[in-house]
């Protein structure tokens, strides 16, 4: 009998890749999506769908027991919240509610998709972020993810694993695409000119790590990236090379960018909409050092990323072009 996995946030960019990897491992996939979610891109997969109410623990327990899930991979969350309350409600309390229900039902493994933002960046170019680094998130998103980690850790009977990926990119990603689209229009924008170390992870590699983590030791956590670090210009340089672009590079003062981001965030909040350009995002983009150590993930879940940034970006840009994004 095939083992059954519930994947929340399954209609998202990362969810797509994790579904594909789960099916490769002969898992029976149940995709938890919002009723309003567009799932046309998931039609190619032989999966089942379900809808969850994360504010109803008893309802979640009933769902898990009735469907008899062996594993739960919790991806659902907000990256660009409209308010602090939304970050805390969705990223912290909804995650905890599902984890609590999973503990009650005795699932074999609960995977919490956190973020490297829960630890936060280093303030110096020296050093590496490790699982033992004292957390110091620089934005509301990171704080909400860290709070979820702490609450889940109180569930002593739950076999959980926490994954903290660096910035994730790949086919279907809309985050990196915003920067790439600007470059395609001839503009390469940056906030400030300070030297930085950045970490990234190709989405299909994150999917491999996630499925591997279903068999990780109990109560474990892992930082994930492609194992390298990149300076602030390497992404742009690769985009120019691969797309054969001639662009104008411009550096905006950090304080100016923060003011624009704050105004944009305020306007979006008044309209009841989320925005990708806000003070939370600028705090991440201007941080000094996101270089993380993946030795623990290599040793315990056999995570050896197959794509560095040049390889992953080449595949990503090819997908954008094939699907008329570029």
Image: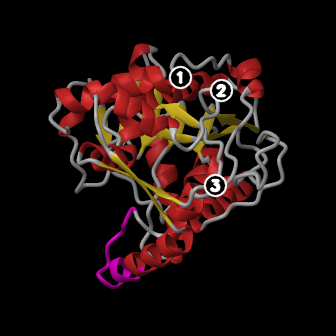
The answer to whether 234 appears left or right of 37 in the picture is: right
Residue at (44% x, 34% y) in the render: 237
Q: Secondary structure at mark 2?
A: loop
Where in the figure is residue 284, as x and y percent of width and height? 58, 57
Density class for disc 2 (Cα within 10 Å; few <14, some 14-19, many ≥20) is some
Q: Is residue 75 shown to the viewer in this render?
A: yes
Mark 3 or mark 2: whose residue is earlier in sequence: 3
Q: Which residues are magenta?
A: 266-276
| Placement of 60 over or under 232, stated as above or below | below
Question: Of 248 and 231, which appears nearest the observer?
Answer: 248
Question: Of 290 and 29, which appears nearest the observer?
Answer: 290
Quadrant in which the C terminus appears? top left
Q: Which mark is residue 308?
A: 1
Where in the figure is residue 313, as x and y percent of width and height? 40, 28
Residue assigned mark 2: 227
Residue at (58% x, 25% y) in the render: 209
């Amino acid at each position: 009998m095939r083992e059954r996995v519930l994947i929340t946030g399954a209609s998202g960019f990362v969810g797509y890749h994790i579904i594909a990897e789960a099916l490769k491992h002969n898992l029976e996939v149940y995709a938890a999506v919002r009723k309003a979610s567009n799932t046309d891109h998931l039609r190619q997969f032989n999966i089942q769908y379900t809808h969850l109410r994360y504010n109803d623990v008893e309802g979640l327990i009933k769902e898990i027991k009735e469907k008899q899930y062996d594993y739960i991979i919790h991806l659902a969350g907000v990256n660009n919240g409209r308010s602090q309350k939304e970050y805390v409600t969705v990223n912290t309390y909804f995650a905890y509610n599902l984890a609590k229900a999973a503990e009650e039902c005795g699932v074999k493994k609960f995977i919490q998709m956190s973020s490297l933002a829960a630890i936060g960046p280093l303030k110096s170019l020296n050093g590496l972020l490790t699982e033992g680094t004292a957390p110091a998130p620089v934005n509301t998103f990171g704080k909400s993810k860290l709070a979820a980690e702490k609450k889940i850790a109180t569930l002593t009977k739950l076999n959980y694993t926490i994954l903290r990926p660096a910035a994730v990119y790949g086919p279907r990603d809309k985050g990196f695409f915003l920067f790439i689209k600007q470059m395609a229009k001839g503009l390469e924008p940056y906030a400030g000119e300070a030297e930085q170390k950045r970490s990234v992870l190709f989405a299909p590699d994150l999917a491999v790590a996630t499925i591997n983590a279903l068999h990780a030791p109990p109560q474990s956590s892992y930082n994930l990236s492609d194992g390298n670090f990149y300076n602030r210009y390497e992404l742009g340089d690769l985009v120019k090379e691969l797309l054969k672009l001639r662009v104008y590079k411009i550096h905006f003062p950090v304080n100016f960018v923060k003011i624009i981001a704050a105004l944009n965030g305020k306007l979006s909040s008044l309209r009841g909409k989320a925005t990708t350009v806000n003070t939370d995002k600028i705090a991440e983009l201007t941080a000094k050092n996101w270089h993380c150590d993946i030795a623990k993930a290599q040793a315990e879940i056999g995570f050896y990323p197959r794509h560095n940034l040049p390889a992953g970006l080449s595949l990503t840009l090819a997908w954008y072009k094939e699907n008329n994004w570029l």
